[in-house]
Image (cartoon, rainbow, N blue to C red):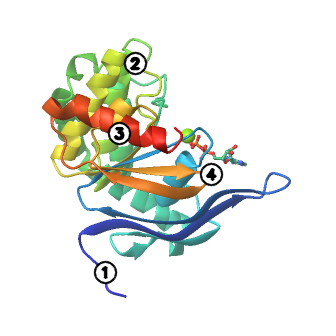
Amino acid sequence: MSHNDQVTLESKDLSKTYYSTDPPTQVLNGIVLSVKKGEFLVVMGASGSGKSTLLYNISGMDRPTSGNVFLEGRDLTSLSDTEMSRVRLTRMGFIFQQAYFLNNLTIRDNILLPALKAAPKEKEIAIARVDKLMERFGIAHVGQHGTTQVSGGQLQRASLCRALACEPSILFADEPTGALNSSMTVEVMDALTDVHSEGTTLVMVTHDPACAARADRVIYLKDGLLIDSRELGKWSRVQAMQREDDLLAWLRELGF
Ligand SMILES: Nc1ncnc2c1ncn2[C@@H]1O[C@H](COP(=O)(O)OP(=O)(O)O)[C@@H](O)[C@H]1O
Ligand SMILES: [Mg+2]
C-alpha cells in the first residue's frame, strides 16, 4: 500500500457498535476519513450523531468494532494497549469540554503531569516547555493557583498547555468551548487557531458554527455516516462573518 506523506491520520471503513445496549447500538458506519498534516478539521453533526465516538476511535481512546485507523502510516488498531498508551502520550494531545484537572494540584503541576510521565528523566526540559506554553497562552500568572481559582477560559487554556506539553503531532478537541461563554470561547479559539498556524494538526468537534468557521475543512456526520464535507480554505479574521454565514447556509441544507 502506498502511503501519501501529506496524510497524517486515516480511517478505513471504521465502524463502531456498542454491545452494552439491547439491541446493540451501531454508532459509526464505515467512516472513511483522511486528515492532512497540519490540517484543521472540524466534525459537526446533531447531538448523538457519533462525533465523540469518532474522535475516541480515531485517537485510540477506544477501539473500533471493525476497520482500521492509521497515524503517520502506522495501524493503531494493531497496537497493544501499552503501545497505544505510549502513542497517545507522546504523539497526541487531547482537550475535552472539561479540563479534568486534579484538585489537589496547582494549575502548573496539572499541566506538567503528563509530560513528566512521558519523559521522567527530562524534568527540566518539561518544566521549561510548560512555562513557555503558559506564558504564550497568557496563564503564567495563575500557575500556582488551584483549579477552582481560575476562570473557565483560563482552565481551557491550561488544558491546551497540558495537551501541548509533550509536543504532539496531532491535537484532538471534543467541544473544547462547549462549557464557555462567548468571550472565553474566543480566547480558547484564538489559542487553538494559533496552535494550528504553527503546524499542529487539529481535529475538533464543535456545534458552534463560529468556532467551526475557523477550520480548513468541516465534515458532517448523520446517524454514524459521514454524509458531507466542505472545504473552507485558510482562515482569516476579516472573512470570519462571511465564512460563518456560508457554513450556516450549508448546515441548514443538511438539516442542522
Ligand atoms: N458507551 C456507550 N454505550 C452505548 N451507547 C453509547 C455509548 N457511547 C455513546 N453511545 C451512543 O452512541 C450515539 C452517539 O454518541 P456520541 O458519539 O456521544 O454522539 P455525539 O458526540 O455526536 O453527541 C448515541 O446514541 C449514544 O447514546
Ligand atoms: Mg459528543
Q: Residue 3: which disc?
A: 1
**Quadrant of the rendered image containing residue 146:** top left
Q: Is residue 230 left or right of residue 138?
A: right
- Locate residue 242: give its quadrant: top left
Q: Is residue 229 above or below residue 109?
A: below
Mark 2 or mark 1: which comes first in sequence? Answer: 1
- Mark 2 vs 1: CB contact within 8 A: no
In terms of secondary structure, where does tag 4 sit? loop
Q: Are marks 1 and 4 in contact (CB under 8 Å)?
A: no
Marking on residue 223:
4
Closest to the camera, between mark 3 and mark 2, is 3
Query: Alpha carbon of mark 1 to alpha carbon of mark 4: how far?
Result: 30 Å
Name the residue that disc number 2 marks.
152
Q: Cα distance, mark 1 to mark 3?
A: 31 Å
Q: Measuring from the top left, give residue 124's x and y in whole percent.
A: 20, 42
Q: Kindly report which numbered mark, 2 or 4, lies closer to the viewer in this rendering.
A: 4
Q: Is residue 192 left or right of residue 251?
A: left
Name the mark on residue 247.
3
Which residue is outermost to the right?
A: 22
- The residue under label 3 is which amino acid type? Leu
Q: Secondary structure at mark 2?
A: helix
Quadrant (top left/top right/bottom left/bottom right) for the N terminus? bottom left
Q: What crowding class fits label 4: few (fewer than 14 Cα within 10 Å), some (14-19), or many (20 or more)?
A: some
User: Are circles 1 and 3 on residues that touch, CB within 8 Å?
Assistant: no
Residue drawn at x 53%, y 47% is: 51
Tag 4: amino acid: Asp
- Mark 3 or mark 2: which comes first in sequence? 2
Question: For numbered disc 1, what is the local secondary structure?
Answer: loop
Amino acid type assigned to the residue bearing label 1 in the image: His
Q: Is residue 91 visible?
A: yes
